Image (cartoon, rainbow, N blue to C red):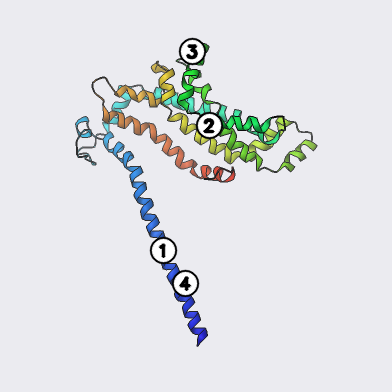
Amino acid sequence: MNADLSATGVVASGLKKSSMERITHFITYVILLFFSGIMVLPFIWMVSSSLKNLEEVSEIPIRWIPETFRFHNYVEVFQSIPMARFMFNSLFVSVSVMILSLFVSSMAAYAFARMDFKGKNILFMSFLTTLMIPQQVTMIPNFLIMKYLGWLNSYSALIFPSVFTAFGVFMLRQFFLSIPKELEEAARIDGCSRFRIYWNIMIPLAQPAFVTLGIFIFLGEWNSFLWPLIVIDSIEFQPIQVGLRSFQGEFMTHWHLMMAGAFIAEAPVLIFYMFCQKYIIQGIATSGIKG
């Protein structure tokens, strides 16, 4: 009899615990959906505005669904400004910075992770302190350097100042530290040089971290606005984020066209992120960067 009562109590306790877990999960999902909706709302307004005329965009209260869907706004964007040129500039700069930054950051990360030299830890910590310096603080010195080198209004001004990143060095160093040293020792026994170990062993093993860092760099450069605005005046070299300012005049802003252009600018990024999301999670999980 006592055994039956005990079993019944265990079952009731389990059911109660299961019900509490379901309620907790439900509340969690409701909260997440609420805040997700708040984050997505500006994007929905951008898409809605891109399909309106200028008068409808300025209406208050906001009309979320246009009376007439003006898909011609997207055609007008390409007719009004050299949108294809702006997209090419952004793509060229983003890919160039990503490739060069991965190469430079991986070499520095390998040196900090595997090579022993005097003052290595102090140098690495000093290098990391640059992460605390806002970009706005270094803009004037960087601008003067670009002017001295004669790189203003060129791709060089957009690419080379962004190649060196302390975050990239830190992230790849954390991944390199997780690779067993026995692999390097075996390679040295076989006669591999330091650079060949780095190139043929460390880089292939660090592909998840490379993909993750490459995505971060690409997205950051694609969405860059302030630095290109300062160093580029010529339309020929303007990236897409700066080029969209063409719709902003002295007395009037064509918001419907700007929103259409913004959606065109963000569409490749969203597609790129959706396909590479699993690599971001894998790279962060295996590189020692956890929140």
Closer to the observer: label 2 or label 3?
A: 2
Residue to which mark 2 is pinned: 131
Discs 2, 3 touching: Cβ within 8 Å: no
Residue to which mark 1 is pinned: 22
Residue at x 30% of width, y 29% of height: 258
Residue 14 is tagged as 4
Residue at x 31% of width, y 26% of height: 77
Residue at x 47% of width, y 80% of height: 8
Q: Amino acid at mark 2?
A: Leu
Q: Quadrant of residue 226?
A: top left
Q: Amino acid at mark 1?
A: Arg
Identify the secondary structure beneath mark 3.
helix
Q: CA distance from mark 4 to mark 1?
A: 12 Å
**Image spot of residue 262 (x, y percent):** 34, 31
Q: Few, some or many C-alpha atoms within 10 Å of disc 3 (few <14, some 14-19, many ≥20)?
A: some
Discs 4, 3 touching: Cβ within 8 Å: no
Discs 1, 2 touching: Cβ within 8 Å: no
Q: Which mark sits nearer the N-terminus, 4 or 3?
A: 4
Q: Quadrant of residue 108?
A: top right
